[in-house]
Amino acid sequence: MDACYDIGMEKIFLVLQNVECEGLGSLADILTSHGYDYNIVRLAKGEKAPKTMGNYAGLIILGGPMNVYQTDQFPFLLDADRLIKQAGNEDKPLLGICLGSQLIAKALDTKVYSGEHKEIGWLPISLSNQAKTDPLFSHLPPKLTVFQWHGDTFNLPQSAIHLASSDLFQNQDFRLGQACYALQFHLEVTGEMVDTWLDEYQTELDSLKGIVDPHQIQQHANIEAEKLNRYSHAVFSNFLIKIVNPIYHSK
């Protein structure tokens, strides 16, 4: 749902949605269950992002199939860059998922580039030693299966805390400061979203025959999505309880 402005802007997240099929997923209910609302700007549909963060509680940038440097084709990526930098300068809570994480890395003047292979499907990540004391990830198992769909990656920004890696990509997750998190993987997806992506990105999957098996992804969706939902609630609830709430209540 879109934001309800009568609850006060400080309780509303600004959400940048880069493509229609990649929405908030499980994160939507987590936000509302903790008393937060959200204003989704559907950039691919031509909706305009605000000029400034204003009194928004924080910024969430979702995924998408585009590259962070395709600003001529997708000029709204420049809006994301501007708002990310502003949120960082104002110490606003900031959460980037997949493309969102790459946009955060780029805004921090860190190189974003194509990996040797694409990483698509239900795949394991390993949490770093630093994640053992991180407010969001400390209670998760050291290895967990998440949903991946990306080919690009990024270097770790200066002063960032490395939180997770996979066999193909060293930098899967980082924290900068206390309130900025960038997740290359997807914790927010539901089984329904996975089915939708398999349809929406059929052309890409066709180009990866023999490398990525969409039938196997679909077969594992029910079991893995249920596990992922538990991880999603743990991580995103911690983001709101341990990061956002203290900032909001200190105002």
Image (cartoon, rainbow, N blue to C red):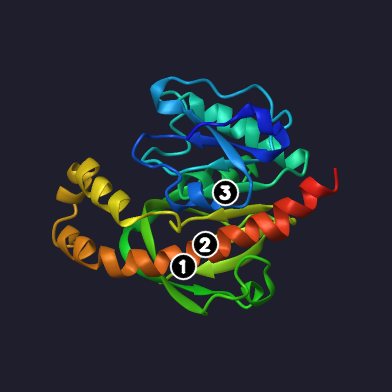
Mark 1 element type: helix
- In this view of the protein, which residue sits in the foreground, 110 or 189? 189
Which residue is the site of mark 3? 31
In the displayed structure, 63 sits above or below 219; it is above
Q: Residues within 10 Å of mark 1 (few under 14, many from 20)?
A: few
Tell which circle, 3 or 2, labels the residue nearer the N-terminal end.
Answer: 3
User: Residue 80's spot in the image, x, y percent?
Assistant: 57, 33
The residue sitting at 44% across, 23% down in the picture is: 72
- Disc 1 versus disc 3: distance between alpha carbons? 15 Å
In this rendering, the answer to whether 237 lies above or below 92 is below
Q: Tag on residue 233?
A: 2
Q: Are marks 1 and 2 in contact (CB under 8 Å)?
A: yes
Q: Which residue in the protein does label 1 denote?
A: 230
Residue 191's place in the image compared with 216, above or below, is: above
Q: Pointers 3 and 2 in contact (CB under 8 A)?
A: no
- For mark 3, give the secondary structure: helix
- At label 3, the amino acid type is Leu
Judge by depth and name the residue closer to the eye, 40 or 43: 40
Q: Amino acid at mark 1?
A: Arg
Amino acid type indicated by mark 2: His
* Residue 6 quadrant: top right
Q: Is residue 231 left or right of residue 20?
A: right
* Residue 112 visible: no
Q: Tell me the number on the disc at residue 98.
A: none
Q: Residues within 10 Å of mark 3 (few under 14, many from 20)?
A: many
